[in-house]
Image: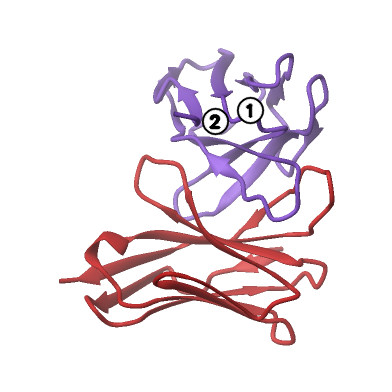
Chain colours: A purple, B red
Amino acid sequence: DGGITQSPKYLFRKEGQNVTLSCEQNLNHDAMYWYRQDPGQGLRLIYYSQIVNDFQKGDIAEGYSVSREKKESFPLTVTSAQKNPTAFYLCASHRRREGQPQHFGDGTRLSIL
Amino acid sequence: DQQVKQNSPSLSVQEGRISILNCDYTNSMFDYFLWYKKYPAEGPTFLISISSIKDKNEDGRFTVFLNKSAKHLSLHIVPSQPGDSAVYFCAASVQQWGSARQLTFGSGTQLTVLP
C-alpha cells in the first residue's frame, strides 16, 4: 500500500533541544511539504521541496530546517530557535502535474516538557 | 492577512439533509481550489477540487461550486451522514505547471451530522 508515513506520532521536547520529525513516502511523488497546524487554525506551510537536494521556505520557516537527500524522505528539524514549537505537524506530497492534490500523512504532535 | 477564510467555525446538520460549507478568498490569482476532510489526530484527506475554468464539480455526494466574481466557493454534501462529521478545510493555490503548488488553507469548519 502506498502512502505517507510520519513518525513518531507523539513527540516531547525539552527546552533548548532540537528534534527531528520523520516523513517518508512511497508514492513516487516529486514534491513534499511540511505544514503546522495550531488549534482553531488552518495549516501553515513551513517548507517545501520540489526535487531532491532542493527546498524552499514557506510562510513560517523560522526555527525550522529540512533536508531532501532522497526522493522518498523529507525530515523536518524543529530547532531550539523555534520559540513556540507545540503544534501538530503534517507532511504532504504530490506529483508535480496539473490537478494533482496533495496527500497527507497522519501527523506528529509535538509538545514541550 | 487571511487570503482564504472560512467564517463558520462550526455547522450542525440533521442526517439526510444537505450540508453547505462556505469559503471566501481574496487573492484573485488563485485558480485551483480543494476541499479536505480531517478527523482528530489524523492528516487531512482530499475530497474534491475545482479549477477556475469550471463553476461546478461533482463527485458522488460531494459537489463544489465556484463563484469567481464573488471569490466564493462552497461544498455541498447530500445527503449528509454521521460519518461526515469532521473538520473541513478549504484550500487554494495558483496552478504552476511542473512546480510545487503552495496551498493556502482556511481555518476549517467543524461539521456535525446529527442522527
As drawn, B5 above or below A81:
below
Contact, CB < 8 Å: mark 1 with mark 2? yes
Residue B17, image x and y in percent? 28, 82
Residue placed under numbered mark 1 in the picture: A82
- B39 vs A16, nearest the viewer: B39
Q: In which image quadrant can residue A78 be found?
A: top right
Under tag 1, what secondary structure? Answer: loop
**Crowdedness of circle 2 by 10 Å Cα count: few (<14), some, many (20+)?**
many
Q: Is B64 placed above or below A12 here?
A: below
Task: Left or right? Give the position of A46 relative to A6.
Answer: right
Q: Position of residue A50 (x, y in %)?
A: 78, 33
Q: Quarter holding the C terminus of chain A? A: top left
Q: Residue at 69% across / 40% down in the picture?
A: A95
Residue A78 in view of the camera: no
Observer able to see residue A4? yes
Identify the residue position indicated by label 2 in the image: A85
Residue B109 x, y percent position in the rendering: 43, 65
Which amino acid type is marked by label 2?
Pro
Chain letter belonging to callout 1: A
Quarter of the figure that contains the N terminus of chain A: top left
Location of residue B40 in the rendering, given as x and y in whole percent from the top left corner: 34, 46
Q: Do the residues at pointers 1 and 2 share their chain? A: yes
Taking depth in this image into account, of A36 and B111 the one nearest to the observer is B111
Q: Amino acid at mark 1?
A: Gln
- The furthest residue to the left: B115
Quick one: SS at disc 2?
loop
B42 sits to left or right of B48: left
Q: Which residue lies at the image location 61% right of the left edge and 45% below the top edge? A: A102
Q: State the residue at coordinates (72%, 32%).
A: A30
**Residue at 79% across, 28% down:** A51
